[in-house]
Image (spheres, rainbow, N blue to C red):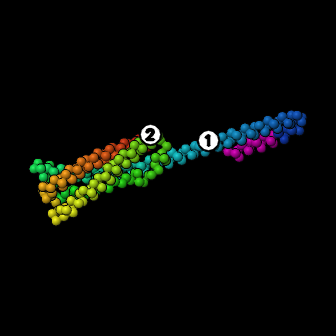
C-alpha cells in the first residue's frame, strides 16, 4: 500500500521536473509546496487504510478464536451433561435407598424392589465425584469471550457449578462423618453389596434410633444436593442452547 502511494509521489515529482523549465521561480515554489502537501495527505491516507485493514484482520482473528472456543465449550458442556446426569441417577437411587430403609424400619411399605444387584453397589456409603470438564478445561473462557450475552450465561453457569460442587463436597463429608462409622460398626452384618437383592438385607440397622437418625439426615442432605445438581444441569442446558444459537447466527 505504501509502495503504491510512493509511485504516485515519484510520478508527480517527474512531472514537476518536466515542467520546471517552463515555470518561474515563484511558480516552482508554489508547485513544490502543493506537491509536499499532497504527499503528506497521501501518506496519511495510506496509514489510515493500513490501520483499518489491520483492525479488520484482528477482528477476524478474534472472531475465529471465539468460534473455536464456543465449539470447545459445547463439547465440554455435553460431557458435563452426561457426567452429571449420572450424579442425578446416583443421588435419586441413594435417596430411594434411604427411604426404603426408613420405611422398612418403621413398618411402612417399601417402595422399590430389586430384581437383581443394587444399581449402586456401595449404597448407602457412596461418595460422588463433582468435576466439570467445561470449568476445568476452559479456565479463561469468561475473559476470552467477546459476546456479552454468552459471557452472562457462562457467568451464571459457573455460579451454579460452584453451588453444585459445594453441595456435593458437603454431602461427601457427611458420608465420611456419619455413614462410614455405621459401616464400621455393622461390618459383620453388612452383606456383600454386589449381591444385594432386597433392602431387607439391611434390617440389622433397625432398632437403633441413632442410626436411623443418621439415615434420615443423609436423606435430607441428598435431597439438597439433588436440587443443586438439578439447577446446574438446567444452567448447562441454557448454556448449550446459547452456544448453539451463537454458532448458528
- Residue at 35% x, 47% y is 163
Q: Left or right: where does residue 135 sit relative to residue 7?
A: left
The tag on residue 166 is none
The image quarter containing residue 52 is top right
Residue 88 visible, this orientation: yes
Q: Marks 1 and 2, Cα distance to the nearest angstrom?
A: 27 Å
Q: Does residue 7 belong to the magenta stretch?
A: yes
- Residue marked by disc 2: 149
Query: SS class of the residue under badge 2?
Result: helix
Give how far across and how far down residue 221 sits, in percent. Answer: 26, 49
- Residue 211 falls left or right of residue 15: left
Q: Please, which residue is most extreme toward the bottom here?
A: 188
Q: Which quadrant, please, contains the N terminus?
A: top right
Examine the residues drawn in magenta and state their main secondary structure: helix
Q: Is residue 98 visible?
A: no
Return the residue nearer the eye: 20 or 66: 66
Crowding near pointer 2: few (<14 within 10 Å), some, many (20+)? Answer: few
Q: Where, by quadrant of the figure, is residue 235 drawn? A: top left
Q: Is residue 117 above or below residue 221?
A: below
- State the quadrant of the C terminus: top left
Q: Which residues are magenta?
A: 1-15
Q: Nearer the viewer, residue 217 or 79?
A: 217
- In this rendering, position of residue 60 left or right of residue 167: right
Which numbered circle lies on residue 52?
1
Residue 244, horizontal then vertical, whole percent: 40, 43
**Residue 13 image position (x, y, % from top left):** 80, 42
Residue 238, x across and y down, in percent:
36, 42
* Location of residue 8 with respect to 114 vertically, above or below: above
Q: Nearer the viewer, mark 1 or mark 2?
A: 2
Residue at image point 78% right, 39% down = 36
Amino acid at each position: 500500500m505504501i509502495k503504491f502511494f510512493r509511485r504516485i509521489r515519484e510520478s508527480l515529482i517527474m512531472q514537476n521536473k518536466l515542467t520546471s523549465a517552463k515555470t518561474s521561480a515563484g511558480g516552482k515554489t508554489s508547485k513544490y509546496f502543493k506537491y509536499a502537501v499532497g504527499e503528506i495527505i497521501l501518506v496519511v491516507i495510506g496509514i489510515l487504510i493500513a490501520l483499518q485493514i489491520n483492525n479488520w484482520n484482528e477482528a477476524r482473528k478474534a472472531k475465529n478464536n471465539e468460534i473455536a472456543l464456543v465449539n470447545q465449550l459445547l463439547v465440554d458442556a455435553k460431557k458435563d451433561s452426561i457426567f452429571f446426569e449420572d450424579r442425578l441417577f446416583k443421588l435419586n437411587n441413594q435417596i430411594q435407598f434411604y427411604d426404603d430403609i426408613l420405611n422398612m424400619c418403621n413398618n411402612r411399605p417399601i417402595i422399590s424392589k430389586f430384581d437383581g444387584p443394587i444399581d449402586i453397589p456401595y449404597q448407602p456409603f457412596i461418595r460422588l465425584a463433582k468435576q466439570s470438564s467445561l470449568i476445568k478445561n476452559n479456565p479463561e473462557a469468561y475473559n476470552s469471550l467477546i459476546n456479552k450475552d454468552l459471557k452472562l450465561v457462562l457467568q451464571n453457569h459457573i455460579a451454579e457449578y460452584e453451588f453444585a460442587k459445594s453441595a456435593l463436597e458437603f454431602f461427601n463429608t457427611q458420608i465420611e462423618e456419619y455413614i462410614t462409622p455405621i459401616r464400621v460398626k455393622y461390618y459383620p452384618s453388612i452383606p456383600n453389596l454386589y449381591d444385594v437383592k432386597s433392602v431387607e438385607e439391611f434390617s440389622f440397622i433397625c432398632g437403633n434410633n441413632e442410626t436411623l437418625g443418621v439415615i434420615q439426615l443423609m436423606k435430607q442432605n441428598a435431597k439438597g444436593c439433588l436440587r443443586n445438581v438439578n439447577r446446574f444441569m438446567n444452567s448447562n442446558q441454557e448454556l448449550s442452547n446459547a452456544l448453539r444459537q451463537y454458532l448458528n447466527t
